[in-house]
């Protein structure tokens, strides 16, 4: 079994004042300040993995629902194409990751456990908090465990520990799966005589005392998503 991974530029939506949005293209090592229309076009391309027809159709429909005219969309698309011609937003190479220890071995992985969110912020790079409007889902326990097992079959035996990061529109929407998978990882890593370390990215809306105790018990590093006040975001 193998996984084909197409790397679109690592992309960070850094901040927004409602009029302009600061973006960072890690592949090109460039900061950009874009208007919200142009930023939305880029964000949809990131969701689809390229500036293809499906991404542009999705961006056009999303912006039309926000009241953006076709003239405004075309002007922003022209601006984005100019940036692409300058070398921004370029695809990286395709990498094949086998489940056998061949070639590059791995020490860390990121698990996308949810495409659902409790909020729906205007500045969100996932179409206002939803990766695929109308089709957002939670990643199942069986799927996450199978991916973890495949990863652990191709890890670097010289590593002192393996790093696992939980990511998603909001991870804690799928908290029960995170807890079960974490226990599975701890058991599997112990069988390999390795330590496991965990990071979670969350807006903390669904953070309960019980969950906080679980994260503390297993020494999670917590990255809090806090983008601005209610007026700016909603």
Image (cartoon, rainbow, N blue to C red):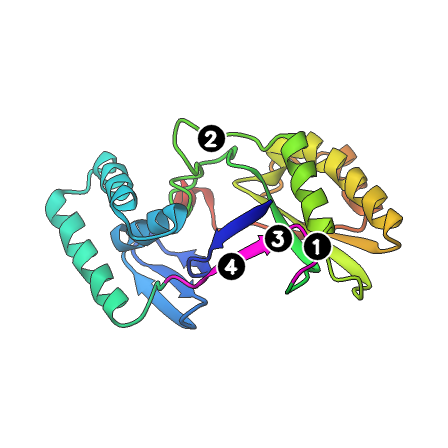
Q: Position of residue 34 (x, y in %)?
A: 30, 60
Label 4 CA crowd tier, 10 Å (few <14, some 14–19, many 20+): few
Answer with mark 2 or mark 3, whichever residue precedes in sequence.
3
Q: Secondary structure at mark 4?
A: strand
Residue range (magenta): 91-102
Residue neighbourhood size for the residue with mark 2, other residues' Cα within 10 Å, grouped as few (<14), some (14–19), many (≥20): some
Q: Residue at x 36, y 50 (%)?
A: 43
According to the picture, the residue beneath numbered tag 3 turns out to be 98
- Residue plotted at (68% across, 62% down): 105
Q: Earlier in the sequence, mark 4 or mark 1?
A: 4
Dot 1 or dot 3, earlier in sequence: 3
Is any part of residue 202 visible from this angle?
Answer: no
Say what secondary structure mark 2 lies in. Answer: loop
| Residue 131 seen | yes
Is 94 or 210 nearer to us in this picture? 94
Instruction: Let me know if residue 222 is in the magenta part.
Output: no
Cα separation between marks 4 and 2: 27 Å
**Label 1 to label 3: alpha-carbon separation:** 7 Å
Residue identifier under label 4: 95
Mark 1 touching mark 3, by CB under 8 A? yes
Q: Is residue 192 left or right of residue 113?
A: right
Query: Which of the marked residues, 4 or 2, is nearer the chain's N terminus?
Result: 4
Contact (Cβ within 8 Å) of mark 4 with mark 1:
no
Residue tagged 2: 136
Near-viewer residue (99 or 155): 99
Residue 55: percent from left, percent from top: 30, 45
Residue with the mark numbered 1: 154
Q: CA distance from mark 4 to mark 1?
A: 14 Å
Please identify the quadrant where the C terminus is shown: top left
Q: Which quarter of the image is occupied by the N terminus? A: top right
C-beta proximity under 8 Å, tags 4 and 2: no
């Amino acid at each position: 079994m193998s996984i084909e991974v197409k790397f679109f530029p690592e992309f960070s939506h850094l901040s927004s004042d409602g009029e302009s949005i600061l973006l960072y293209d890690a592949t090109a090592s460039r900061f950009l300040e874009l208007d919200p229309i142009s930023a939305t076009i880029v964000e949809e391309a990131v969701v689809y993995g390229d500036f293809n027809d499906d991404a542009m159709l999705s961006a056009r429909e999303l912006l039309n629902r926000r009241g953006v005219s076709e003239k405004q969309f075309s002007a922003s698309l022209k601006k984005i194409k100019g940036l692409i011609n300058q070398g921004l937003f370029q695809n990286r190479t395709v990498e094949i990751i086998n489940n056998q220890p061949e070639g590059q071995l791995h020490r860390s992985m990121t698990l996308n456990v949810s495409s659902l969110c409790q909020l729906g912020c205007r500045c969100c790079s996932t179409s206002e908090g939803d990766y695929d409007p109308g089709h957002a889902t939670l990643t199942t326990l069986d799927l996450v465990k199978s991916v973890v097992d495949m990863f652990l079959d191709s890890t670097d035996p010289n590593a002192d520990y393996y790093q696992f990061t939980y990511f998603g529109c909001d991870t804690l929407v799928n908290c029960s799966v995170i807890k079960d998978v974490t226990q599975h990882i701890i058991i599997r890593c112990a069988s390999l005589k390795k330590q496991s370390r965990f990071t979670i990215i969350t807006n903390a809306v669904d953070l309960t005392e019980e969950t906080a105790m679980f994260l503390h018990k297993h020494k999670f590093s917590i990255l809090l998503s806090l983008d601005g006040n209610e007026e700016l975001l909603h």
